[in-house]
Image (cartoon, rainbow, N blue to C red):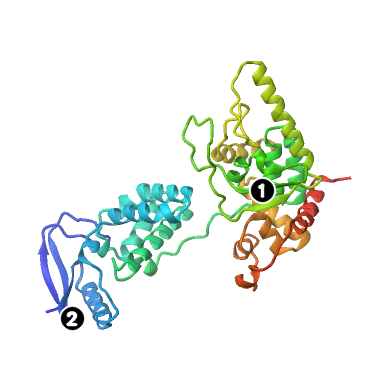
Amino acid sequence: MAIQERTVKNKRNSSGELTGRAGTVYDVNIKYKSDGQPKTYSRKGFPSKREAQQHEAEMKLKLASPSYSPPRAAQRKQTVQEYMTDWLDRHGSANLRPSTRASYQSHMKNHIFPCIGDVFLGQLSPSMLDDMYRQLSEKGLSQSSVKYAHRIMGVALEHARKYHYIDSNPARDTITKFGKQGKTPDPYTVEQMRSLLANVMGTWWELVVVLGGLYGLRAGEILGLRWRNVDLIHGSFAVVEQLPFRLPPGTTEVAEMAPVKSSERVLPITESTRPYFERHRAQQEEQKRLMAAAGQIYYDNDLVIAKPNGIPDRTQHISTEFGQLLRHLGMPHMRFHDTRHSAATNMHQLTGDFYTVGQILGHSLKGIGIQLNLSTNLEAVTAQYVDVRLERKLVVLDTYHQAVLDVG
C-alpha cells in the first residue's frame, strides 16, 4: 500500500509545530523504476490522509518522467533553519550585496526561524507559511515586513527546488493577501529642492544635498567619493566606488572602497554646482590647516565628504540625521534615498530624456522605468548600443540645476 498510517507520540499540527500529544500520521511510499532499476520514494509524517493522497498523486506523475530526479532524503531532513543558514552563507556571499545579506540574516533570525525554523524542509507546506505570516502580523509587524519575509522565503525555497531538495516551492502556493504598503513619499519638486538647498547653505549638508538631490547619488556613493575622482579643471567627477558596508567601529582610514551598486559613470560638474564643490574643497583645506596648527591628527582619506578630522562618515548617520533635519526645517518627510528619486523625476520632467536620466543615475532601462513609474518598449539589446556622451548628460543636468539654483 502506497499510504500507511503510523502512530507517533508527539504529532505536528498543520503549521509544523509539535503538539506534545500522540496522534496518527501518514507516510507515502511509492515504488517506481529509473533507468530500468527498481527504486522507492518515501516521504513520512503527513498530518492528514488527504495531504498524503495529494502528495502521492503529484509524485506518481513526476516519477513517471525519466528526467525527474526526486529530492534526496538528506536534504529533506534538513530543518528550515539549517537549510536557510547554509543557503545564505553560500548564495549570499556571492550574489547579495552586503547590506541585503545582513538584512536577510536579521529577518530570518528575528522573524522566520522562531516560527518555522525547526520544521523539516521536506515537510514545509503553504499552510505553514500562511500561519507564519499571520503570526508575524499578530506580533505587530508591518505589512511591508511580513511581505519581506515572504520574499525571502520565496527566493530561498525556489533555490531549494532547483537544487532538488524539495519537489515544489511552497511559497508559490500561499493564499495570504498582503495589504497595501505604506505610501512612498512624493519626490521633492524643483521648488522644494531649492528651499532645501537654501536652508542647508553653509552647513555640512550643503554638498551632500547637491550630490544626492541634484545628481542622484546614493549615500554610499557620496561618502565614497574621493577627490582623486573629481576633476574641477575639466568639470567632471567619476562615480566608480562607494563606502564599504558597515565599517567596523573606530575605523579611521579606508584602504579600499567597495564597487558601486550599479554601473560606473562619469558626470559633468555644471556651472551651477561648481561653486559648491570649490567652496567645500576650500573649507576642507582650511579645516586641515587649523587641525595641524592645533596639533591634532587629520586622517586624510582623500574623501570629499568626511568628518572634520577626515574620518569616513556612515550612511546610517546620513539616514538618521536627514530625517531630523527635515523635521527641524518643517519640510515634508522623506528618506535621504528619496532625494535620488527627486533628482530622477525632476530631470525627466524637465527634459523628457528617459535614457540619459538612467545613465546619470547608473540605472538600466528597466531600473529607471521602475523608478519613474514608466514603461519602455526599448529592448535591452538595442539600448546596449546607445551612447550617451558627457555632453548629453551636461544638457540634462544643466537644465535641472539651472531650474533649482539659477533664480533671477
Q: Residue at horizontal 33%, vertical 64%?
A: 160
Q: Quadrant of the N terminus?
A: bottom left
- Mark before the other along the chain sequence, 1 or 2: 2
Disc ID at residue 32: 2
* Residue 156 percent coordinates (x, y): 37, 60
User: Do the CB atoms of the residues marked 1 and 2 lie less than 8 Å apart?
Assistant: no
Residue nearer the viewer, 255 or 380: 255
* Residue 220 percent coordinates (x, y): 58, 44
Kind of residue at badge 2: Tyr
In the displayed structure, 50 sits above or below 143; it is: below
Q: Residue at horizontal 64%, vertical 15%?
A: 294
Q: In which quarter of the image is the C terminus?
A: top right
In the displayed structure, 141 sits above or below 246; it is: below
In the displayed structure, 291 sits above or below 189; it is: above
Residue nearer the viewer, 359 or 193: 359
Q: Is residue 335 among what the camera can see?
A: no
Kind of residue at badge 1: Ala
Q: Is residue 127 among what the camera can see?
A: yes
Camera-side mark, 1 or 2 = 1
Disc ID at residue 238: 1
Is 23 left or right of 145, judged from the image as shown? Answer: left
* Residue 100 percent coordinates (x, y): 47, 51
Is 395 left or right of 120, judged from the image as shown? Answer: right
